[in-house]
Image (cartoon, coloured by chain):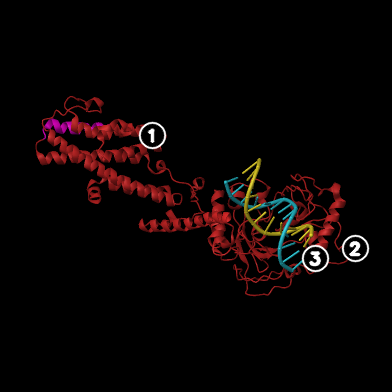
Chain colours: A red, B yellow, C cyan
DNA sequence: GAGTTTGAAACT
DNA sequence: CAGTTTCAAACTC
């Protein structure tokens, strides 16, 4: 534009009063100098704005006309020339001021890190950046709009750029570059985002709930990001895509599930999960469009993302199913793949996190199981002995003694568990032994882990132990020939015990599998209490031989 | 931290 | 003005 001004010797633009374009957050707060970088005193934001407004062209729409919701594929974007000249948009359907819940600092910053690790974290999305970005330009000499410092009207200061000319030492070159850019596009240094925070916040970085009326003046042209990544200038500026945009498969519109998913389902401490969710959101609905045009290699990648999205849905469905099956209150099991229970922020669950068996099966549970099996075994013995009426007193005492020894052994095992970290392999070893036992190879007891010895000893005590064991404690040497005159009875008892023990153990394993599935699908959204409640149910079932027998049969 | 992806800016 | 190239940030691994 050829607007004339005493202070605009060329291009109608005042020398040294330029700059600032890529700053999407042109809010009044931005008029104050930024901390880290030197803002050209000639180009404070307010001054720039007023100058630019005075200069030439009609300014960007100060009053933001409500825009229609932008739905992918439905918009017919104006030409770029129209965009640049900011012709009045067709006032279309009213798009009311949309509330953009800005993610908390824990939600949005790079990789979802709960902290704000660097300047990028504050960046343009925040209304009041407290730290200036530091560019990393290499080839542009920081004299093109690629450079964010240059574009925002600041000298590079403390940046990581090379061959930087965006300094006071190179003011002449800098000025020339600005003029060239303005010649090409007089709006080049105007704020890209026209917005006016309404009903906002204290301006702090932590306060993100800002009602934003605004849009990207030029609009974005995103093709692959779904406008849900910071590649997208609209998304980066926390505004919705508008009719100005030429984006493809846009998901940055009011009411977009994907957008809600990204913004509202947070918080999460797992940046990978955030990005996965975003990718899932992006790819989940774009597979029918742009996906088909992808090269094979990209297709594969995208396919994976789509699968992730599908998995997310499947998991959500499964969680809902489980919730219904278990009649779990949503409050305790509210599942949101992006949300972690606020009470347990540090244990934010991830889909990628597979629950360990040790997380499910606690030592108490094993203790309960051992006790249960011992009791079952004893009951079986008594039951058989009662039927036969042939077991003499010594035999009964023998059984009882072995039971008590088994219980004691079980206690020892759990004491051991309490004293050392629970080792999943131990449990799995025990379970493996259980399978072996079920197959009948009981003479290979030496392969059993020590934790299973109480149970093994129980069986063997009954079957093999005679009165030569005064204590009844587990003793490998007791595996001798049967001396009891009621050998057949003891064999029956042994068989019955084994049957019941295995039956209960099998039931336990089934419950464990169920719990694992539940835990795996909803592990982090289920509260620990909820999960324990389920385990308690399992235990209750297991501890009731009657129920257990009936169920297993 | 290196490599890749992305989309704006710049160029033809 | 459309297509291509360059660029640096964003992102992934």
Q: Which of A472 and A29 lies nearest the eye of the viewer? A: A472
Circle 2 residue: A6
Q: Is residue A517 left or right of residue A498?
A: right
Q: Is residue A197 visible?
A: yes
- The residue lying at 32 percent from left, 49 percent from top is A537
Q: Which residues are magenta?
A: A391-408
Q: Which residue is mark 1?
A: A418
Q: Nearer the viewer, residue A32 or A13?
A: A13
- Asked if marks 1 and 2 fall on the same chain, the answer is yes
Q: Residues within 10 Å of mark 2 (few under 14, many from 20)?
A: few
Q: CA distance from mark 1 to mark 2?
A: 83 Å
State the residue at coordinates (68%, 71%): A65
| Residue A98 location (% of width, % of height) | 61, 66
- Residue A200's spot in the image, x, y percent? 64, 60
Between discs 3 and 1, the one toward the N terminus = 3
Judging by the rendered image, the residue that carries numbered circle 3 is: A53
Residue at 25% across, 48% down = A548
Upstream in sequence: badge 1 or badge 2: 2
Dominant SS of magenta comes to: helix
A161 magenta-colored: no
Sequence-first disc among 3 and 2: 2
Q: Tag 1, which secondary structure?
A: helix
The answer to whether A368 appears left or right of A495 in the picture is right
């Amino acid at each position: 534009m050829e607007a004339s001004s005493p202070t605009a010797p060329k291009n109608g633009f005042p020398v040294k009063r330029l700059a600032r374009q890529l700053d999407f957050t042109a809010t009044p707060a931005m008029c104050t100098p930024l901390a880290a970088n030197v803002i050209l005193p000639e180009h404070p934001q307010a001054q720039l704005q007023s100058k630019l407004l005075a200069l030439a062209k009609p300014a960007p729409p100060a009053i933001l006309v409500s825009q229609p919701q932008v739905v992918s594929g439905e918009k017919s974007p104006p030409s770029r020339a129209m965009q640049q000249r900011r012709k009045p948009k067709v006032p279309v359907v009213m798009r009311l001021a949309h509330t953009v819940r800005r993610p908390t600092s824990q939600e949005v910053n790079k990789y979802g890190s709960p902290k704000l690790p660097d300047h990028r974290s504050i960046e343009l999305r925040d209304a009041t950046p407290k730290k200036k970005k530091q560019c990393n330009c290499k080839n542009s000499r920081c004299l093109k709009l690629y450079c964010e410092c240059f574009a925002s009207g600041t000298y590079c200061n403390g940046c990581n750029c090379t061959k930087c000319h965006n300094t006071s030492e190179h003011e002449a070159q800098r000025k020339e570059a600005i003029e060239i850019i303005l010649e090409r596009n007089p709006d080049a240094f105007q704020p890209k985002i026209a917005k006016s925070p309404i009903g906002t916040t204290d301006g702090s970085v932590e306060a993100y709930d800002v009602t934003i009326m605004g849009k990207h003046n030029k609009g974005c042209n995103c093709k692959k990001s779904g406008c849900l990544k910071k590649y997208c200038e609209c998304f980066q500026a926390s505004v919705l895509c508008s009719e100005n945009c030429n984006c493809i498969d846009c998901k940055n519109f009011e009411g977009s599930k994907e957008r809600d998913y990204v913004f509202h389902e947070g918080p999460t401490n797992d940046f990978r999960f955030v990005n996965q969710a975003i990718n899932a959101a992006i790819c989940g609905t774009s597979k029918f469009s742009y996906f088909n045009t992808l090269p094979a290699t990209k297709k594969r990648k995208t396919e994976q993302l789509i699968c992730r999205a599908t998995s997310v849905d499947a998991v959500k469905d499964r969680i809902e199913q489980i919730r219904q099956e278990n009649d779990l209150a949503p409050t305790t099991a509210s599942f949101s793949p992006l949300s972690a229970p606020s009470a347990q922020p540090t244990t934010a669950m991830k889909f990628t996190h597979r629950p360990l068996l040790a997380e499910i099966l606690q030592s108490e549970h094993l203790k309960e199981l051992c006790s249960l099996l011992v009791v079952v075994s004893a009951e079986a013995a008594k039951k058989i002995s009662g039927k036969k009426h042939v077991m003499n007193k010594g035999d009964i005492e023998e059984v009882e003694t072995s039971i008590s020894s088994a219980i004691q052994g079980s206690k020892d095992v759990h004491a051991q568990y309490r004293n050392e970290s629970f080792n999943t392999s131990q449990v799995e070893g025990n379970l493996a032994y259980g399978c072996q036992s079920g197959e009948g190879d009981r003479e290979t007891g030496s392969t059993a882990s020590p934790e299973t010895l109480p149970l093994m000893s129980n069986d063997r005590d009954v079957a093999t132990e005679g009165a030569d064991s005064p204590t009844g404690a587990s003793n490998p040497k007791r595996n001798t020939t049967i001396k009891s005159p009621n050998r057949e009875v003891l064999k029956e008892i042994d068989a019955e015990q084994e049957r019941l023990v295995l039956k209960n153990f099998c039931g336990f394993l089934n419950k464990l599998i169920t719990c694992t599935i539940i835990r795996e699908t909803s592990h982090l959204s289920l509260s620990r209490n909820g999960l324990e409640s389920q385990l308690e149910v399992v235990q209750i079932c297991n501890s009731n031989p009657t129920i257990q027998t009936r169920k297993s049969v």
